[in-house]
Image: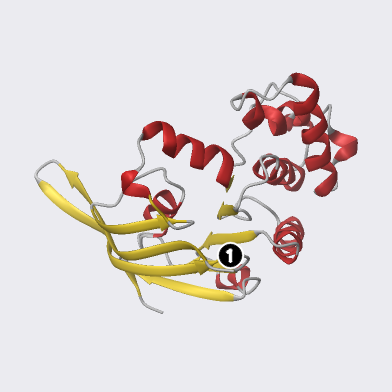
Amino acid sequence: MGAIVSLREVSRTYQLGSVLVPALIDASLEVQDGEFVAIVGPSGSGKTTMMNILGCLDRPTSGEYLFDGVAVSELDEDELALVRGRAIGFVFQNYSLLPRTTALDNVAAPLLYQGVNRHRRAERARAALRRVGLEDRDAHRPSELSGGQRQRVAVARALVTEPRMILADEPTGNLDSQSGREIIALLRELNASGRTIVLITHDRDVAEAADRHVILRDGRVAA
Protein backbone atom coordinates (compact mmCIF):
# COMPACT_ATOMS: atom_id res chain seq x y z
CA MET A 1 0.00 0.00 0.00
CA GLY A 2 1.18 3.51 -0.83
CA ALA A 3 0.02 6.73 -2.44
CA ILE A 4 -1.15 6.24 -6.02
CA VAL A 5 -1.96 9.96 -6.28
CA SER A 6 0.07 12.74 -4.72
CA LEU A 7 -0.63 16.41 -5.45
CA ARG A 8 1.84 18.83 -3.91
CA GLU A 9 0.74 22.48 -3.88
CA VAL A 10 -0.72 22.17 -7.37
CA SER A 11 -2.18 25.25 -9.04
CA ARG A 12 -3.79 25.62 -12.45
CA THR A 13 -4.37 29.04 -13.99
CA TYR A 14 -6.10 29.68 -17.31
CA GLN A 15 -5.64 32.76 -19.46
CA LEU A 16 -8.85 34.21 -20.85
CA GLY A 17 -7.77 37.03 -23.09
CA SER A 18 -5.68 39.29 -20.87
CA VAL A 19 -7.17 37.90 -17.66
CA LEU A 20 -5.59 35.12 -15.57
CA VAL A 21 -8.22 32.90 -13.93
CA PRO A 22 -7.05 30.61 -11.11
CA ALA A 23 -9.04 27.36 -11.21
CA LEU A 24 -6.98 25.43 -8.65
CA ILE A 25 -4.84 27.02 -5.96
CA ASP A 26 -2.06 25.27 -3.99
CA ALA A 27 -3.99 22.00 -3.80
CA SER A 28 -2.34 19.16 -1.91
CA LEU A 29 -3.87 15.68 -1.81
CA GLU A 30 -2.86 12.06 -1.39
CA VAL A 31 -4.94 9.06 -2.39
CA GLN A 32 -3.72 5.70 -1.16
CA ASP A 33 -3.77 2.59 -3.32
CA GLY A 34 -7.16 0.90 -2.79
CA GLU A 35 -8.93 3.95 -1.36
CA PHE A 36 -12.39 5.23 -2.31
CA VAL A 37 -12.21 9.03 -2.19
CA ALA A 38 -14.87 11.58 -3.14
CA ILE A 39 -13.86 15.05 -4.30
CA VAL A 40 -16.84 17.23 -3.49
CA GLY A 41 -17.70 20.82 -4.35
CA PRO A 42 -20.21 23.05 -6.10
CA SER A 43 -19.96 24.23 -9.69
CA GLY A 44 -16.90 26.43 -10.12
CA SER A 45 -15.05 24.95 -7.14
CA GLY A 46 -12.26 23.42 -9.26
CA LYS A 47 -13.51 19.82 -9.42
CA THR A 48 -13.23 19.49 -13.19
CA THR A 49 -9.76 21.03 -13.22
CA MET A 50 -8.61 18.64 -10.52
CA MET A 51 -10.10 15.69 -12.39
CA ASN A 52 -8.32 16.71 -15.58
CA ILE A 53 -5.01 16.92 -13.73
CA LEU A 54 -5.53 13.62 -11.87
CA GLY A 55 -6.44 11.96 -15.18
CA CYS A 56 -3.36 13.36 -16.95
CA LEU A 57 -5.65 15.27 -19.32
CA ASP A 58 -4.10 18.58 -18.26
CA ARG A 59 -0.91 19.73 -16.57
CA PRO A 60 -0.56 21.97 -13.52
CA THR A 61 0.68 25.52 -13.93
CA SER A 62 2.78 25.01 -10.79
CA GLY A 63 3.29 22.36 -8.13
CA GLU A 64 3.92 18.66 -8.60
CA TYR A 65 1.73 15.67 -9.43
CA LEU A 66 3.05 12.17 -8.77
CA PHE A 67 1.07 9.25 -10.18
CA ASP A 68 2.15 5.95 -8.70
CA GLY A 69 5.41 7.60 -7.65
CA VAL A 70 6.20 9.05 -11.09
CA ALA A 71 6.37 12.82 -11.66
CA VAL A 72 3.81 13.49 -14.39
CA SER A 73 5.67 16.65 -15.46
CA GLU A 74 8.55 14.46 -16.64
CA LEU A 75 6.38 12.40 -19.00
CA ASP A 76 6.09 13.25 -22.68
CA GLU A 77 2.78 13.11 -24.56
CA ASP A 78 3.20 9.46 -25.59
CA GLU A 79 3.98 8.43 -22.02
CA LEU A 80 0.98 10.40 -20.75
CA ALA A 81 -1.23 8.63 -23.29
CA LEU A 82 0.02 5.28 -21.96
CA VAL A 83 -0.88 6.28 -18.39
CA ARG A 84 -4.35 7.40 -19.49
CA GLY A 85 -4.90 4.30 -21.61
CA ARG A 86 -3.63 1.65 -19.22
CA ALA A 87 -3.46 2.92 -15.64
CA ILE A 88 -6.55 5.14 -15.39
CA GLY A 89 -10.15 4.26 -16.25
CA PHE A 90 -12.58 7.11 -16.90
CA VAL A 91 -16.34 7.19 -16.26
CA PHE A 92 -18.13 10.36 -17.38
CA GLN A 93 -21.57 11.82 -16.66
CA ASN A 94 -22.60 11.65 -20.33
CA TYR A 95 -21.31 8.05 -20.80
CA SER A 96 -19.19 9.01 -23.88
CA LEU A 97 -20.21 5.87 -25.76
CA LEU A 98 -19.99 5.46 -29.54
CA PRO A 99 -23.67 5.63 -30.60
CA ARG A 100 -23.57 3.24 -33.58
CA THR A 101 -21.39 0.67 -31.86
CA THR A 102 -22.47 -2.31 -29.76
CA ALA A 103 -21.86 -2.47 -26.03
CA LEU A 104 -19.20 -5.13 -26.64
CA ASP A 105 -17.29 -3.01 -29.13
CA ASN A 106 -17.62 0.11 -26.96
CA VAL A 107 -16.03 -1.76 -24.08
CA ALA A 108 -13.34 -3.28 -26.30
CA ALA A 109 -12.35 0.07 -27.87
CA PRO A 110 -9.52 0.95 -25.42
CA LEU A 111 -7.86 -2.39 -26.19
CA LEU A 112 -7.88 -1.66 -29.91
CA TYR A 113 -5.53 1.27 -29.30
CA GLN A 114 -3.25 -1.04 -27.33
CA GLY A 115 -2.89 -3.43 -30.25
CA VAL A 116 -4.74 -6.33 -28.56
CA ASN A 117 -5.94 -8.82 -31.18
CA ARG A 118 -9.63 -9.08 -32.03
CA HIS A 119 -10.32 -12.38 -30.27
CA ARG A 120 -8.66 -11.27 -27.05
CA ARG A 121 -10.42 -7.88 -27.18
CA ALA A 122 -13.82 -9.57 -27.39
CA GLU A 123 -12.91 -12.01 -24.63
CA ARG A 124 -11.83 -9.26 -22.23
CA ALA A 125 -14.78 -7.02 -23.14
CA ARG A 126 -17.24 -9.84 -22.39
CA ALA A 127 -15.54 -10.42 -19.05
CA ALA A 128 -15.85 -6.71 -18.20
CA LEU A 129 -19.54 -6.66 -19.18
CA ARG A 130 -20.06 -9.73 -17.01
CA ARG A 131 -18.52 -7.88 -14.06
CA VAL A 132 -21.12 -5.12 -14.38
CA GLY A 133 -24.04 -7.49 -14.98
CA LEU A 134 -24.57 -6.76 -18.68
CA GLU A 135 -23.26 -9.88 -20.40
CA ASP A 136 -26.71 -10.35 -22.02
CA ARG A 137 -26.61 -6.87 -23.59
CA ASP A 138 -23.34 -7.17 -25.47
CA ALA A 139 -24.95 -6.81 -28.92
CA HIS A 140 -27.11 -3.79 -27.97
CA ARG A 141 -26.30 -0.28 -29.11
CA PRO A 142 -26.49 2.62 -26.61
CA SER A 143 -29.90 3.72 -27.94
CA GLU A 144 -31.24 0.27 -26.98
CA LEU A 145 -30.06 0.60 -23.38
CA SER A 146 -31.39 2.53 -20.39
CA GLY A 147 -29.33 5.30 -18.83
CA GLY A 148 -28.22 3.02 -16.02
CA GLN A 149 -27.20 0.32 -18.50
CA ARG A 150 -25.24 2.84 -20.58
CA GLN A 151 -23.33 3.89 -17.49
CA ARG A 152 -22.62 0.24 -16.68
CA VAL A 153 -21.18 -0.13 -20.18
CA ALA A 154 -19.03 2.94 -19.46
CA VAL A 155 -17.83 1.36 -16.20
CA ALA A 156 -17.03 -1.87 -18.06
CA ARG A 157 -15.03 0.12 -20.62
CA ALA A 158 -13.11 1.77 -17.77
CA LEU A 159 -12.37 -1.66 -16.31
CA VAL A 160 -11.32 -3.50 -19.45
CA THR A 161 -7.70 -2.32 -19.28
CA GLU A 162 -7.48 -3.35 -15.60
CA PRO A 163 -6.47 0.19 -14.52
CA ARG A 164 -4.87 1.09 -11.20
CA MET A 165 -7.47 3.84 -10.63
CA ILE A 166 -10.97 4.71 -11.81
CA LEU A 167 -11.89 8.40 -12.10
CA ALA A 168 -15.68 8.77 -12.04
CA ASP A 169 -16.85 12.28 -12.94
CA GLU A 170 -20.47 12.87 -11.80
CA PRO A 171 -21.32 9.25 -12.81
CA THR A 172 -24.90 9.51 -11.50
CA GLY A 173 -25.62 12.99 -12.88
CA ASN A 174 -27.84 11.83 -15.77
CA LEU A 175 -29.49 8.93 -13.94
CA ASP A 176 -32.67 8.45 -11.95
CA SER A 177 -32.26 7.79 -8.22
CA GLN A 178 -32.46 3.99 -8.46
CA SER A 179 -29.99 3.73 -11.36
CA GLY A 180 -27.68 6.14 -9.54
CA ARG A 181 -27.71 3.97 -6.42
CA GLU A 182 -26.90 0.92 -8.54
CA ILE A 183 -23.88 2.64 -10.14
CA ILE A 184 -22.58 3.76 -6.75
CA ALA A 185 -23.06 0.21 -5.39
CA LEU A 186 -21.07 -1.07 -8.38
CA LEU A 187 -18.23 1.37 -7.65
CA ARG A 188 -18.22 0.21 -4.03
CA GLU A 189 -17.99 -3.42 -5.17
CA LEU A 190 -15.05 -2.57 -7.40
CA ASN A 191 -13.35 -0.77 -4.54
CA ALA A 192 -13.94 -3.75 -2.25
CA SER A 193 -12.09 -5.89 -4.79
CA GLY A 194 -9.06 -3.59 -4.50
CA ARG A 195 -9.62 -0.93 -7.15
CA THR A 196 -8.78 2.70 -6.28
CA ILE A 197 -11.82 4.91 -6.94
CA VAL A 198 -11.83 8.72 -7.14
CA LEU A 199 -15.37 10.05 -7.40
CA ILE A 200 -15.97 13.65 -8.51
CA THR A 201 -19.38 14.98 -7.45
CA HIS A 202 -21.32 18.04 -6.33
CA ASP A 203 -23.82 15.79 -4.50
CA ARG A 204 -22.96 15.12 -0.88
CA ASP A 205 -25.44 12.24 -0.73
CA VAL A 206 -23.58 10.52 -3.59
CA ALA A 207 -20.26 11.29 -1.86
CA GLU A 208 -21.41 9.35 1.21
CA ALA A 209 -20.50 6.15 -0.63
CA ALA A 210 -16.81 7.04 -0.36
CA ASP A 211 -14.63 6.34 2.65
CA ARG A 212 -13.09 9.82 2.61
CA HIS A 213 -14.24 13.24 1.38
CA VAL A 214 -12.07 16.02 -0.03
CA ILE A 215 -13.94 19.32 -0.11
CA LEU A 216 -13.06 21.87 -2.80
CA ARG A 217 -14.13 25.47 -2.46
CA ASP A 218 -13.07 28.33 -4.75
CA GLY A 219 -10.19 26.28 -6.13
CA ARG A 220 -8.77 25.33 -2.75
CA VAL A 221 -8.86 22.13 -0.75
CA ALA A 222 -10.99 23.16 2.22
CA ALA A 223 -11.07 19.83 4.08
Query: Residue 199 versus residue 69: which sits nearer the camera?
Result: 69
Q: Residue at x 55, y 72 (%)?
A: 204
Colour pattern of the rendering: secondary structure
| The furthest residue to the right | 136
Residue 19: percent from left, percent from top: 12, 49
Q: Is residue 11 left or right of residue 142?
A: left
Residue 68: percent from left, percent from top: 49, 56
Q: Is residue 173 left or right of residue 156?
A: left
Helix, strand or loop for disc 1: loop
Residue 210: percent from left, percent from top: 62, 71
Q: Callout 1: 10 Å neighbours few (<14), some, many (20+)? A: some
Q: How many marks?
A: 1
Residue 46: percent from left, percent from top: 36, 60
Question: Which residue lies under the disc numbered 1?
Answer: 33
Q: Residue at x 35, y 69 (%)?
A: 28
Query: Residue 6 versus residue 197: which sits nearer the camera?
Result: 6
Query: Residue 76 versus residue 205: which sits nearer the camera?
Result: 76
**Above or below, 56 relative to 11:** above
Q: Quadrant of residue 116?
A: top right
**Above or below, 72 relative to 208:** above
Is residue 218 visible to us here?
Answer: no
| Quadrant housing the N terminus | bottom right
| The furthest residue to the left | 18
Q: Residue at x 74, y 48 (%)?
A: 148
Tell me which amino acid carries mark 1. Answer: Asp
**Above or below, 179 relative to 119:** below
| The furthest residue to the bottom | 223
Is residue 95 visible to us here?
Answer: yes
Q: Residue at x 47, y 61 (%)?
A: 5
